[in-house]
Image (cartoon, helix red, strand yellow):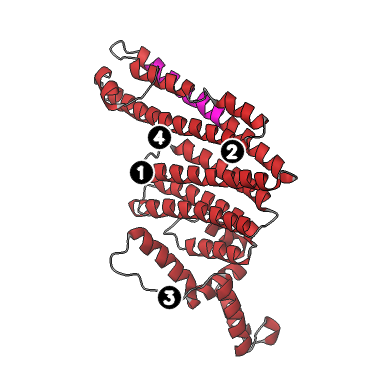
Amino acid sequence: MSDILKQLKALKNEPVAGAVSGSRQLVAREKLMEAIGHTPTETPQIGFSYAHYYRWSVLEFISTPMTVGATVVVLLFGGWLTTVNAAQSLPGDTLYTVKIATERAQLRMASLEHKAVLHTEFAGRRLEEAAAIKDSVDPEQKEYYKSTMEAFKQQVTLAEGDLRKMQQEGNEQTSTVASQIDNQIDKLTTALSTTNGTVAGPELNDAIDVTREISHSVVNVIVEEHEATLIGGSSTDVQTAFKKDLTNVYTRQALALARVQVIKNVLAEHPEAKMTAADALERSLKQATEHVGDAQNIVAAGGYREGFTILREAEEQLLTVERQIVDMEIIITTTFSSQEDVSGEIMEETQVSSSE
């Protein structure tokens, strides 16, 4: 490695090795700074939250000229191994700044259509990072969990913002890009739901709520584009979006019912336990899709907006029951593990609303 560095130093001023004049270096530097989104340095003020300071420190670091130069050297001479390592890095790691700088450069150079989709891809990375941080045994690493979840929400929100901007500009690709974002957000929702219960907490629930709101907004764009044109690709896009959401509703209901059945099986092994709460959850889950059949008929007649409204009501009820299921699973697990009586705790700590 030392020999390579010596050779590089020896060649740095040779034209054949790419040496350029000071003026050309200045122009190149300005282009590079613009590509990575450099902004004037701002010092964090007293009273900033940890998440704000973390985001400032990362952006400050990657915007520093010396760091920009180091990043370029790493990317040019470090080879694919360094790039892979940066891609796998987590907040707090040395190479994480390279990862963020690369993402920012991609966004700066991307078209608005591509940028909107890129935000959802980067949101997926933040979610993977958050899961890895949560599983980490390093207490210092865990400090980045909250800020990483904030970054996840920021990315999905930016995706929606770019999509809305496309719509306002009358971009012909709005409906197509909206469908792509809808598919990406669907994957994010699935990833969030798989961690629910194992990484439960306010940050996760907040991320689920934000992602759901963004998903609804994206579907609204698809519906609005369909209503505005009523011809061409938008019709296919809105039909695809409805079928996907319809499938998701029934899939979530089936999975939730299976979880409730597991709960009932566990309770059945304990004669002292009561089934009342579990039965109420089961009824609520079945009631959630009572009007979904109406939505299908309405959509068949062209009423997509009303059809999606019915699906969203079903999703909201499913989400409420899903969180109640998580509460019950936690209560049962902790109660049985401590060998305490389960009958009173489930009825007192799990609030289930059901209508006859």
Mark 1 in CB contact with mark 3 (< 8 angstroms): no
Whether 29 is among the magenta residues is: no
Q: Which residue is mark 3?
A: 41
Q: Which residue is mark 2?
A: 305
Label 2 to label 4, Cα distance in Å?
33 Å
Q: Nearer the viewer, mark 2 or mark 3?
A: 2
Where is residue 216? Give x, y as percent.
53, 43
Find numbered disc 4 in the image and state the secondary structure of the residue it sits on: loop
What are the residue bounds of the magenta stretch?
A: 249-266
Where is residue 86? Give x, y as percent.
53, 59
Find numbered disc 3 in the image and state the secondary structure of the residue it sits on: loop
Residue at the spot 44% in from the left edge and 70% down from the top edge: 61
Q: Nearer the viewer, mark 1 or mark 4?
A: 1
Q: Amino acid at mark 3?
A: Thr
Q: Amino acid at mark 4?
A: Gly
Mark 1 in CB contact with mark 4 (< 8 angstroms): no
Q: Nearer the viewer, mark 2 or mark 1?
A: 2
The image's mark for residue 1 is: none
Label 2 to label 3, Cα distance in Å?
46 Å
Mark 3 in CB contact with mark 4 (< 8 angstroms): no
